[in-house]
């Protein structure tokens, strides 16, 4: 385990410092890109192969999960939410490789994901409702609440970043302490527990992003009732 909670600097390019977390994240992106190209270069409309069937089942599963969560057409959100689940999940699992650490144990990495989540909420909200109507909800029920509404959304995103960072850092420290105390008598159960926990954290981050997006595009107050709209 690293001596510091901060990622070590690997390369300095002038005033820019490239940390271990950044390098690992780039490596995961490169691996995902290569795997995606290899798995999708021979897709067929008729008589798909086994690999294509598995891929389509995964995408359909993501689509169904999104549809159940927001009760709307899921495909506009599949790339973002599915990408989050896959990418964050793999980043969380990097520590299973000897000598590597989770990039998500770095607050800068989780803050970047939280920023993407924050911006996507407003992007879909404006796209669905229009800029004027979307901004109007910040002054409801009275305009004096606007600063509190804005602060609430900012703090929500900060909480997501700190939550993922804290969970991943604390779990890595717990595993290191247990291995130090118990040696390698219980590595397999720990690895299985770590695998499940890492995937759950990735799912929760994407699911929270999806819920916040749904809140920005679907819920409108009409005559005292909350009505759920369906994306067109």
Image (cartoon, grey):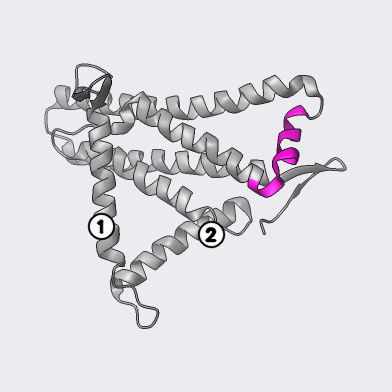
Residue corresponding to mark 2: 75
Is 136 magenta? The answer is yes
Res 36 seen here = yes
Q: Is residue 182 left or right of residue 212?
A: left
- Seen from the viewer's position, the closer of residues 33 and 2 is 33
Q: Magenta residues, as a range?
A: 127-139
Callout 2 secondary element: loop
- Seen at 31% across and 38% down, the residue is 92
Q: Are marks 2 and 1 in contact (CB under 8 Å)?
A: no
Q: Which secondary structure is most common in the magenta stretch?
A: helix
Badge 2 density bin: few <14, some 14–19, many ≥20, Cα 10 Å? some
At 46% from the left and 53% from the top, the residue drawn is 79
Q: Is residue 102 left or right of residue 160?
A: left
Image position of 155 with respect to 34: above or below: above
Residue at image location 66% in from the left, 56% down from the top: 231
Identify the residue position indicated by label 1 in the image.
35
Q: Residues within 10 Å of mark 1 (few under 14, many from 20)?
A: few
Q: In the rendered structure, which disc, 2 or 1, sits on the residue that comes first in sequence?
A: 1
Task: Examine the image and state in which quarter residue 97 appears.
Answer: top left
User: Can you tell which quarter of the image residue 156 is in?
Assistant: top right
Q: Image height check: is 115 above or below 69?
A: above
């Amino acid at each position: 385990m690293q001596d510091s909670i901060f990622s070590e600097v690997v390369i300095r390019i002038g005033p820019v410092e490239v940390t271990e977390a950044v390098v690992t994240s780039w490596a995961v992106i490169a691996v995902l890109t290569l795997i995606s190209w290899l798995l999708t270069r021979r897709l067929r409309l008729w008589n798909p192969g086994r690999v294509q069937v598995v891929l389509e089942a995964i995408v359909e599963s993501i689509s169904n999960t999104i549809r159940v969560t927001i009760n709307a057409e899921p495909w506009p959100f599949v790339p973002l939410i599915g990408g989050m689940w896959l990418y964050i999940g793999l980043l969380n699992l990097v520590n299973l490789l000897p000598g590597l650490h989770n990039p998500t144990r770095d607050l800068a990495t989780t803050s970047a994901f939280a920023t993407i989540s924050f911006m996507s909420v407003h992007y879909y909200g404006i796209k669905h409702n229009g800029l004027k109507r979307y901004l109007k909800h910040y002054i409801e029920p009275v305009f004096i609440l606007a600063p509190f509404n804005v602060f609430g959304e900012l703090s929500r995103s900060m909480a997501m970043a700190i939550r993922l960072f804290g969970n991943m850092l604390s779990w890595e420290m717990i595993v290191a302490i247990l291995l130090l105390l118990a040696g390698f008598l219980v590595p397999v159960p720990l690895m299985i527990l770590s695998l499940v926990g890492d995937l759950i954290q990735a799912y929760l981050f994407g699911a929270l992003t999806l819920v916040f997006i749904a809140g920005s595009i679907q819920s409108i107050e009409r005559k005292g009732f909350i009505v759920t709209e369906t994306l067109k």
